[in-house]
């Protein structure tokens, strides 16, 4: 960047340098194979601009050329934030998403929803409470809006490299949040979501995953819709769960009747549709030591015994679905394992009644 005659960078130029570095870092993380797709989805650089760029050169040189084009078009911080949102949409599985559920007061009327009003209200609430914050929006299909929030403090500018991403589906009580969110900012984010969406209260659900679409399927019960209409009148003998009746013929005590029972029970619990994708389920147990013999160290312990069990898999629900048919577990599985989608939870706390 050019310097002013006094040798100091002017305020506007300093901002330009900040935006240029933001663009450089954002473009640099886009894989070459996805570069054109992401830039076209961004729709800031025209087709003519993109045709002037050599996409076969070294990535560092390509990034530099693209940043110069953005500077020539006087790209703003918000333009850079939109590019970052699009990149994140392509790579949403790299984030860990939490689910938040909102509610209204009993008997409260549901007002007509206006997305532009929601965005305006959401942004005003954050900016009134916090001097240094940038908020960007991108509308998507299915009446959803992606929100990107870069937090600052009263004395520091927003950190563009540790933003919060929020996906909100209009006229629903659910928001999905991926972030490096400071606990101190969580109440403010909750307030902005509830007020802007015209709800009264918000709570964080015990549900988390890298797979945003699976979380959406769980909370909106979309997988149940498929199950209810899929081959509901087809006899069991004609259905296929991908299980070969003869696959375990080497096991002496295996029999056809038991296999059909396992198939039936597994299908009743999980259905024959693809399961939502979760990577883990965590169970925390708290229980008092109980004994008929009123003696010993544990009997006198006031604090409950605590235990944590975590099940992990690249596709946990499909793995659980396959346990009984593979002969690894008895059918049916424990309800604590099979209730995950219906309860919308993969964090459980188990305490004494």
Image: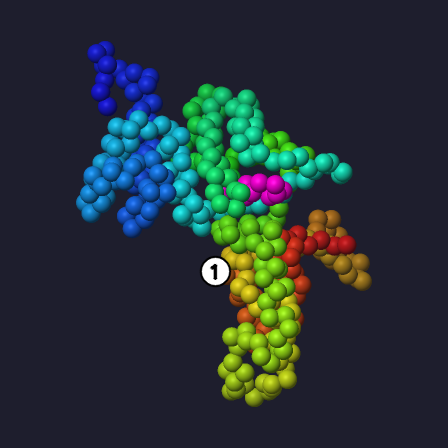
Q: Position of residue 122 (x, y in %)?
A: 55, 30
**In the image, is 77 to the left or to the right of 173?**
left
* Tally of numbered discs: 1
Q: Is residue 338 above or below residue 186?
A: below
Q: Is residue 242 above or below residue 47?
A: below
Q: Is residue 14 above or below residue 219?
A: above
Residue labelled with disc 1? 314
- The answer to which of 249 and 117 lies nearer the viewer is 117
Locate the C terminus by quadrant. bottom right
Locate the N terminus by quadrant. top left
The answer to whether residue 258 of the structure is visible from this angle is yes
**In the image, is 147 to the left or to the right of 297?**
left
Residue at horizontal 41 percent and vertical 43 percent from the top: 88
Residue at horizontal 50 percent and vertical 61 percent from the top: 315
Q: Secondary structure at mark 1?
A: loop
Q: Based on the displayed image, in which of its 4 quarters is residue 317 positioned?
A: bottom right
Q: Based on the displayed image, in which of its 4 quarters is residue 196 positioned?
A: top right
Q: Position of residue 170 (x, y in %)?
A: 57, 40
Does residue 169 belong to the magenta stretch? yes
**In the image, is 121 to the left or to the right of 89?**
right
Residue at horizontal 61 percent and vertical 65 percent from the top: 229
Q: Position of residue 63 (x, y in %)?
A: 25, 39
**In the image, is 335 to the left or to the right of 82?**
right
Q: Main secondary structure of the magenta part?
A: strand
The answer to whether residue 331 of the structure is visible from this angle is no
Q: Residues within 10 Å of mark 1 (few under 14, many from 20)?
A: few
Q: Based on the displayed image, in which of its 4 quarters is residue 73 positioned?
A: top left
Q: Position of residue 201 (x, y in %)?
A: 67, 36
Q: Is residue 268 above or below residue 258?
A: above
Residue at horizontal 22 percent and vertical 36 percent from the top: 65
Does residue 8 belong to the magenta stretch? no
User: Over which residues does the magenta segment extend?
Assistant: 167-178
């Amino acid at each position: 960047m050019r310097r002013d005659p006094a040798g100091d960078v002017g305020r506007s130029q300093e901002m330009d340098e900040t935006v240029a570095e933001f663009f450089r870092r954002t473009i640099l993380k886009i894989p070459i194979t996805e570069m054109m797709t992401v830039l076209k989805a961004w729709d800031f650089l025209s087709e003519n601009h993109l045709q002037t760029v050599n996409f076969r050169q070294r990535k560092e040189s390509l990034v530099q050329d693209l940043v110069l084009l953005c500077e020539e078009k006087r790209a703003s911080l918000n333009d850079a934030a939109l590019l970052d949102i699009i990149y994140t949409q392509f790579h949403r599985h790299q984030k860990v998403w939490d689910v938040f559920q909102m509610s209204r007061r009993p008997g409260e009327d549901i007002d007509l929803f206006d997305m532009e009003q929601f965005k305006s209200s959401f942004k005003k609430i954050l900016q009134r409470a916090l001097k240094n914050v940038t908020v960007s929006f991108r509308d998507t299909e299915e009446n959803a809006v992606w929100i990107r929030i870069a937090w600052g403090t009263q004395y520091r500018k927003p950190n563009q490299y540790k933003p919060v991403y929020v996906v909100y589906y209009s006229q629903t009580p659910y928001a999905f949040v991926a972030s490096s969110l400071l606990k101190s900012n969580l109440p403010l984010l909750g307030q902005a979501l509830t007020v802007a969406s015209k709800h009264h209260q918000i709570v964080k659900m015990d549900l988390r995953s890298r797979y945003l679409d699976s979380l959406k399927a769980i909370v909106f019960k979309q997988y149940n819709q498929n199950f209810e209409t899929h081959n509901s009148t087809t006899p069991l003998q004609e259905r296929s769960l991908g299980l070969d009746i003869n696959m375990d013929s080497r096991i002496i005590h295996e029999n056809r009747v038991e296999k059909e029972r396992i198939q039936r029970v597994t299908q009743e619990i999980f259905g024959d549709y693809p399961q939502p994708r979760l990577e883990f389920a965590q169970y925390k147990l708290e229980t008092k030591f109980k004994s008929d013999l009123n003696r010993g160290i544990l009997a006198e312990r006031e604090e409950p015994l605590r235990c944590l069990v975590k099940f992990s898999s690249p596709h946990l629900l499909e793995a659980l679905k396959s346990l009984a048919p593979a002969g690894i577990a008895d059918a049916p599985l424990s309800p604590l394992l099979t209730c995950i989608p219906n309860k919308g939870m993969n964090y459980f706390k188990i305490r004494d009644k």
